[in-house]
Amino acid sequence: MSWTATIITLFPEMFPGPLGQSLAGRALESGTWNCDVRDLRAFGLGRHNAVDDTPFGGGAGMVMRADVVDTALESVSRQDGAPCVYLTPRGRPLAQADIRRYAAGPGVTLLCGRYEGVDERVLEARAIEQVSIGDYVLSGGETAALVLLDACVRLLPGVMGSAESGVEESFSDGLLEYPHYTRPAEWQGRSVPDVLLSGNHAAIARWRREQSERVTRERRPDLWAAHLSHSSRPSVQEGQSL
Ligand code: ADE
């Protein structure tokens, strides 16, 4: 059985979208993963297949009905251990550790919200994980679902070209990645750091580690603090300053 993304959405045409191209597209064609899209409208009520209603307590917009969402989720064959994830700016931040967990399992069921969101009761009743891809508001969960799936699919066995490219990348050890360079060695008066042309693999590894630590410290003090509190290994910089 291939890794299955089951997507519940009011806009089924948005899938696989960009994931039909390149690495993910080839993996989809070869059956490494499977994109099972369900149109939430098909589970709507009455003549107009209503999926939403006005919010109790008043206020702007509409809320997706718990009963409609529940019926749609009930229609999804229960894959063993496949988590159900609701994409929402109210969710906890999505991290690479979540992606690794999703990719290691049988797949994910993704619930894409529109309007003001989904009635909280169905999220509670089904213990749905609520996840945000960042502190900004998208017009719906679909583009967030595409982001989550892109990150999962590239980790599936056989999808990425080189085995290393999955290990030595940003977040794999809680640090951002070091900078990359290629030919020409001199470009518009800018040269590549000498160490990268030295052939000294130990020196290169050390330089890359220093760069990773510098970039993380400068750009992501939150990641840097977490890295320092988790890692037993002293950083290159700390090592030098001792
Ligand atoms: N839906 C709307 N905005 C979102 C976000 N930032 N993350 C996940 N889902 C969303």
Image: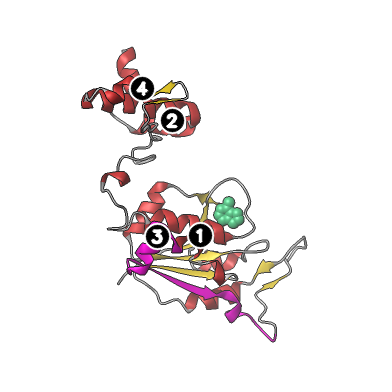
Residue that mark 2 sits on = 216
Query: Which SS class for mark 4?
Result: loop
Marked residue nearer the N-terminal end (3 or 4): 3
| Residue 41 image position (x, y, % from top left) | 61, 77
Residue at position x 22%, y 27% in the image: 201
Camera-nearest label, 3 or 4? 4
Could one spot residue 89 in this view of the protein? no
Q: Are marks 2 and 4 in contact (CB under 8 Å)?
A: no
Give the side of residue 66 with respect to residue 109, left or right.
Answer: right
Magenta extent: 20-47
| Residue 196 image position (x, y, % from top left) | 30, 25
Of the pair 121 and 7, the residue shown nearer to us: 7
- From this viewpoint, which residue is outermost toward the top? 242
Residue at position x 36%, y 69% in the image: 29
The mark found on residue 24 in the picture is 3
Marked residue nearer the N-terminal end (4 or 1): 1
Residue at position x 41%, y 33% in the image: 226
| Residue 189 image position (x, y, % from top left) | 46, 21
Could one spot residue 142 in this view of the protein? yes
Q: Are marks 2 and 1 in contact (CB under 8 Å)?
A: no
Residue at mark 3 to residue at mark 4: CA–CA distance: 34 Å
